[in-house]
Image: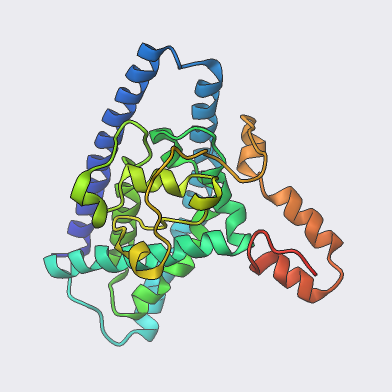
Amino acid sequence: MNTGTIQELGAQIDEAFLLIGAAVFLIELARALFKGSLKGRNIAEMFVSASTQIPFLAVEIFIMTGAYGIYYIISDTWVSWTMPLNGWTVALAILVADFFYYWEHRMAHMVRLFWTQHAVHHSSREFNVITSIRFGPLESAWSFFAFIPMVLLGFHPALVLFGLAAVLAYQTWIHTETIGKLGPIEWIFNTPSHHRVHHGADEKYLDKNYGGILIIWDRMFGSFQAEEEKPYYGLKRDFNSQNPLYVWFSELPQLWRDLQAAKSWREVFMRLFARPDWQPK
């Protein structure tokens, strides 16, 4: 097995989940049309979710493509050995990437600077497959740093990128209200039910179910919450815009105002790296 094979396998996984997501989306549209619930606002919400791909892909193409090359520099310079490329290490890469994704995702909720990007994903009052591609412009920047430890552990950079891609591809199909609870699968895997909780702005649902593929990390680290009543989706604060620019940069204006009003360097630091709801005493 070589890096080309791994890249091809990653593309196949991505395509498979894209097809699954497309099928779920068609079912969502059919249900909405049958119920007469597909209105202008719903369509506008889907378009603005899709629009976030414009700045996100621009950053991916012109900045992150080169940045990922740093993984190879780190591997060649500071890592004395790398794991072989075979079926076992491919499977292990997915498992370890899922573990690191859990903590990357959790930190994106706990650190305000990271939240300014991840909040874009949570800002929709709708919950459907299109929400799965709603990203902040610089969301992949924090992800890049969060997965450097995998390189330092001896994973070939191609395995790191493959594992991350697999974790992200999996999550396409779990952004839906069409699929209910899935029985025993709910104990191990992240499912639409678990991810609906994650997008809920209800107090009991806030900051829960960070898992990518597996929900066992949430069960292990105390962040699990089962779906009970239907979640109220979106941000906890009142935000319900379908203006693309407002959505792309929804958290930055208030952060800028808070930094300008900061009375010390410590407050500047806390405004950037404390929890999003942190306030000075």
Q: Quadrant of residue 177?
A: top left
Q: Locate residue 103 relative to residue 192 in the image: left or right.
A: right
> Is 12 situated above or below 139?
above
Outermost residue to the front: 228
Q: Quadrant of the N terminus?
A: bottom left
At x 41% / y 33%, what residue is drawn?
Answer: 128
Is 50 in front, or is 207?
207
Q: Name the residue at 43% across, 12% down.
A: 36
**Which residue is farthest bottom?**
80
In which image quadrant can residue 243 be found?
Answer: top right
Task: Please provide percent x and percent y for residue 57.
Answer: 48, 45
Seen in the picture, residue 113 relative to 79 is either above or below; the reply is: above
Q: Nearer the viewer, residue 69 or 28?
A: 28
Q: With 203 as the anchor, is 94 left or right in this view? A: left
Coloring basis for residues: rainbow
Question: Which residue: 55% across, 24% down?
Answer: 44
